[in-house]
Image (tube, helix red, strand yellow):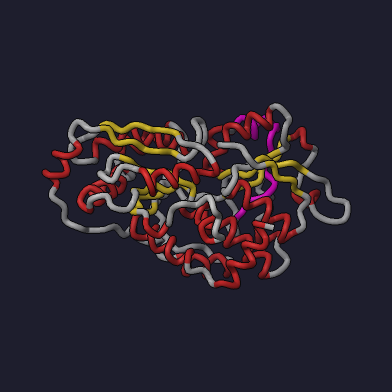
Amino acid sequence: MIKLRVSIATLIFFLLAGAAIPTLAAQRRSTHIDEGAVAAFYRGKVVRIVVGFPPGGGADVYSRVLARHLGRFIPGSPTLAVTNMPGAGSMIAGNHIFNAGAKDGTEIGMLNGALILEQLFGNPGIHFDMARFRYLAVPVTETYVMIVARRSGIASFSELVGANAKQVVLGAIPNSTLEHAPILLREALGANLKVVSGYKGSADIRLAIDSEEIGGFFNPWSTVKTSSLEKFTSGQWSVILQLSDQRLPDLPSPSVPTIQDLAHDENQRMLLRYGAIAPNQFGKVYMLRDGVPADRATALEGAFARIFADPSFLADAEKSKLEITPLYGESIRQIVEDFLAMPAGVKEKLKRAIKR
């Protein structure tokens, strides 16, 4: 099924109302290109996907499956390669793509959409403008869940709030939902969560849980159920919270609470929805730097659109247990622009919560 969010204003309306988000037909640029000229440029070249996370995590896995097929849909059939540039929740990769990335269309960035909050809050490490990237696609919209290890001694989220709350230590990647979500839950709900940031990717966090350095983490369910399903079936890990208003149908337990179940007022719901739910509609986002020739950018966007309907790619994605619910260029841009135009009052509440 293909899902599309036309604007963040519409998205937030449905999120704040607790309603289901509508599914619409995908919209993409229809710019005419000189396919022969584009093919002549790409023939024999290597196109690199620069992933802002280390090998082994969801962003890397999606990118490597895409790289196996994407060249067939780009005029000239170039070779695709994946380069990992981890650090600061993909901020380092974002700075590279925006300032030093290839302007000729031979370098595609893959960043974490939650970085938009860091730009909104004026993080001094941000040296890019998300409004100026040329967006290509998002392969999947994501719902984050809170995962705890059995060794943590936590069986339910309710144990983490209230006068006699237990504490759990969560691993996090800086400037990402893995960091933002527990901070917001601590601020909005008073959850007794200790956040240890500094991990470069979710693979490192999983190793830290296995070595008992930390007790859990947040991760997209679409990613963690494919990378670590045996942890849940064996009871080593549990899901105790889903950052959504709509219950996910395939969680290990049907009683995992949602934001609707836990938030006591609209202010709490607003903080969690703007800060931890909405950014993940474009959590894994592929883009080009500003200045790539329009015909090549259009050809690359078209290639992403075609690959997500290709039986061979979809079979490979299914084999790798990857969900595909794509979102395309112009719609992503509208989300980004509307997000950056967030009302000042909401922005200040989020900033105070996340940056205190």
Residue that sits furthest to the right in the current view: 164
Segment colored magenta: 230-243
Q: Quadrant of residue 109?
A: top left
Q: Position of residue 128 (x, y in %)?
A: 43, 53
Front residue (pair 254, 202): 202
The correct choice, above or below, for 85 with respect to 300 in the image is above
Q: In this image, 108 relative to 228: left or right?
A: left
**Vertical order, 184 against 93 (above or below):** below
Residue 87 in the image: state x and y as whole percent: 53, 39
Q: Which quadrant of the figure has residue 348? A: bottom right
In terms of depth relative to the viewer, which is nearer, 250 or 30?
30
Please tell me in which quadrant of the rendered image residue 332 appears.
Answer: bottom left
Q: Position of residue 318 (x, y in %)?
A: 42, 36
Residue shown at 51%/49% (left/top)?
142
Q: Which quarter of the rendering shows the C terminus?
A: bottom right
At horizontal 72% and vertical 35% (from top left) the residue drawn is: 214
Q: Which of 315/211 is in front?
A: 211
Q: Is residue 226 above or below residue 118?
A: above
Who is closer to the viewer here, 12 or 176? 176
| Side of 144 relative to 314 (left or right) | right
Residue 60, image x, y percentages:
46, 35
Residue depicted at x 52% and y 63%: 20
| Left or right: residue 272 compared with residue 65 | right
Number of numbered discs visible in the structure rendering: 0
Q: Residue at x 42, y 31 (%)?
A: 319
